[in-house]
Image: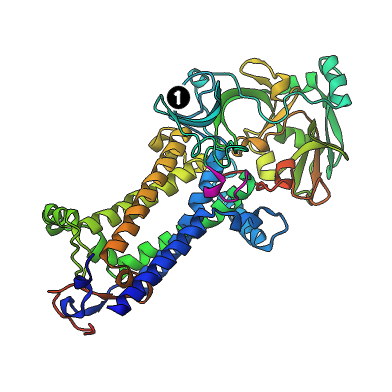
Amino acid sequence: MSDATELPASTGPLIYRQSVWTRVTHWVWAICLFFLLLTGLQIFNAHPALYIGQESGFEYENAVLEIGAINTEAGPRGRTILFGRSFDTTGVLGMSGDMARPSFTAFPGAVTIPSYRDLATGRVVHFFFGWIFVGTMLLWFVASFINGHIRRDIVPKPADLAGLPRDMAEHARLRFKRGRSYGPLQKLSYFTVFFILFPLIVATGLTMSPGLDTAWPFLLDIFGGRQTARTIHFSVMVLLVAFFVVHIVMLLLAGPINELRSMVTGWYRTGPGTPDAEGDRP
Amino acid sequence: MSRLITRRNFLRGSALAGSGLVLAGCDQFDFLGRSDNPVRGVMEQANVLTYRAQRALIGDQALAREYSASEIRQGMKPNGSVEPSTPEYMFLKMQDFAPYRLTVKGMVEREVSFSLDELRNMPARSQITRHDCVEGWSCIAKWTGTQLGPILDMAGVKPQARFCVYHCFDNIQRTLAGDILYYESSDLVDAYHPQTILSYGLNDQVLPVANGAPIRLRIERALGYKQPKYLHTIELVDDLKPFGQGKGGYWPDNGYDWYGGI
């Protein structure tokens, strides 16, 4: 990012880009996902293994991920087994903290709420924010359907797909178009988050409930068993964390003040060449 | 230009502060672990919402999925107490539970009690179900026993009764002040559910001590801690406060949600 791109002469009009629904749900989600992630890792730590199928194999092997600690001749080490391949993850997974007095949790206390082992509290906080997350999601879908946000900015149109290669090339050169609406890659990633990842993480979370499995047994069939659902829930979490990282990197690269302002006040400074429209500010 | 640099410094500063908050991990939120914290109290209301929503959504008679025999691929993993050491339990175990009696008392027309043989001679129900532990794992096993509903009817549940409290033999926690005995409770919907059985058989064998001999209650639509092992007394009550620390079960007293359906 060079200073030249920030000079006033090279900008388009100031547009009202984000509705109050988009802005409020964005920040509520940000808070929810922060707590859901950190309490989710706490809950995972209670049984740090993921399986494929209805149940967990204790007398046979159906685990795809296991995080733990083992004793070696050189002392205890953190070990992670992913798809049968073993990795030494001492210091990060399975064993972390001060090596004189290590902590033997799967994910370190620095990324769990509470910072110590407390499954009960992790669940209380997780379900509280789970309800808020789902409520906000319903609100967003209704509001964004009515105000046209989904149609205008989220669902990719044929023209977006046609412009995808060009948009990818521009991104690779770290040149971002700051237009009236989102670019093809933006639309695709937000579409993936709203229409695939969010519904998927909620549905797989519900599949882990023995109560809801009774009301909606098809959940177990869709996801191939409760333990597979748990594995998908975890995998979608990893994808959402990856989205968050890219989201922040893009925000920093595309101009953090402008991007943050649009998500706080709704007003967004477009790039040069953006045509003026009614309601814009100079 | 100078304005931009100031902005940039400001941003760098806030980014550092923000990441510091995240990296400091979250001792800041450890207060949520204290049971008397008011914020936690608010958050716990989400569990009440979950209970009400699930009761509204799930038919009272809807059955938990039952699996086929071929899906039993391993023994039932024991968890929690596996070898109770209270004198009463040791005495019963030594005599192969011959003197054991299951008592139904409290808000009932008549207190009743049954020997193990009497329970085994009642109509039996077998169900191959998935046991979901609160820790996250699941295990499929076949449970055989007699339904709790008809037994409650024999005792005659009084209209004011709202909950069943399940008293158990096992000393789940030993403290300086003495043993803490396991107990659990459920509403009458779960108590009368067709799959709620007093199980005495596991995978076509006599229920082993590690899994709750002689009687373990199965409440199939809830998590493992709602399946009390080493059960000896069922008490019908209208209030859970007088028991344990008042939250309706050993694990609920330790911060877990009482309903246990999620």
- Residue B43 coordinates in the image, percent (x, y): 61, 58
Tell me the subunit letter for badge 1.
A
The residue drawn where x is 38% and y is 37% is A222
Q: Quadrant of residue A19?
A: bottom left
Q: Quadrant of residue A143?
A: bottom left
Vertical side of B125 occupied by A105: above or below: below
- Residue B94 coordinates in the image, percent (x, y): 85, 15
- Residue A205 coordinates in the image, percent (x, y): 47, 45
Prevalent SS, magenta region: loop
* Secondary element type, mark 1: loop
Which region is colored magenta? A108-117
Which one is nearer the viewer's eye here, B16 or B259? B16
Image quadrant where one finds the C terminus of chain A: bottom left
Which residue carries the number 1 mark?
A62
- Residue A150 coordinates in the image, percent (x, y): 28, 63
Vertical side of A13 occupied by A42: above or below: above
